[in-house]
Image (spheres, grey):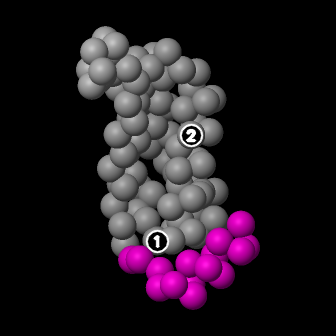
């Protein structure tokens, strides 16, 4: 995924679906939609330094899960990020330097 993929035009149905998912996830995590979008964009940016990903198949969710230390439920991030290719060492270093 290139930086330009973040700006490619999506149809209105896809945009509406993404917004609804974002609202549902942010509500469950007691986190604003703006923060959720920032988290998603940061994850995409970092992972894109090392591999090309399928941004259309990307699914990032914040849910509640039981704490291992018996502190009740705590937020957890689950990400399903389809990988197209993994950059070799020199490609990853070049991409990291650009960002």
What is the total number of numbered labels drawn onto the structure image?
Answer: 2
Picture coordinates of residue 83, whole percent (x, y): 36, 67
Q: Please identify the quarter of the rendering in which residue 76 is found.
A: top left
Picture coordinates of residue 45, whole percent (x, y): 59, 58
Mark 2 Cα-neighbour bin, 10 Å: few <14, some 14–19, many ≥20:
few
- Residue at the (63%, 57%) spot, across then down: 7
Q: In this view of the protein, which residue sits in the foreground, 82 or 87? A: 87
Picture coordinates of residue 22, whole percent (x, y): 47, 30
Answer whether residue 13 is visible to the viewer in this image. Answer: no
Does the magenta-highlighted stretch encompass residue 78? no
Q: Which residue is mark 1?
A: 52
Q: Secondary structure at mark 1?
A: strand
Q: In this view of the protein, which residue sits in the foreground, 52 or 49? A: 49
Answer whether residue 9 is visible to the viewer in this image. Answer: yes
- Residue at the (63%, 29%) spot, across then down: 34
Q: Which residue is mark 2?
A: 39
- Residue at the (56%, 40%) spot, across then down: 39
**Residue lying furthest right:** 98
Does the magenta-highlighted stretch encompass residue 94? yes
Side (left or right) of 86 relative to 65: right
31 up-or-down from 46: above or below: above
Side (left or right) of 91 relative to 80: right
The span shown in magenta is 85-99
Q: What quarter of the picture does the C terminus occupy?
A: bottom right
10 up-or-down from 65: above or below: below
- Residue at the (39%, 77%) spot, across then down: 85
């Amino acid at each position: 995924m290139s930086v330009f993929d973040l700006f490619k035009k999506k149809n209105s149905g896809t945009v509406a679906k993404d917004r609804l998912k974002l609202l549902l996830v942010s509500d469950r995590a007691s986190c604003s939609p703006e923060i959720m979008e920032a988290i998603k964009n940061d994850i995409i940016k970092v992972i894109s330094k090392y591999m090309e990903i399928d941004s259309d198949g990307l699914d990032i969710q914040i849910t509640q899960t039981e704490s291992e230390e018996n502190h009740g439920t705590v937020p957890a991030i689950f990400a399903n990020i389809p990988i197209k290719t993994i950059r070799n060492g020199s490609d990853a270093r070049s991409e990291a330097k650009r960002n």
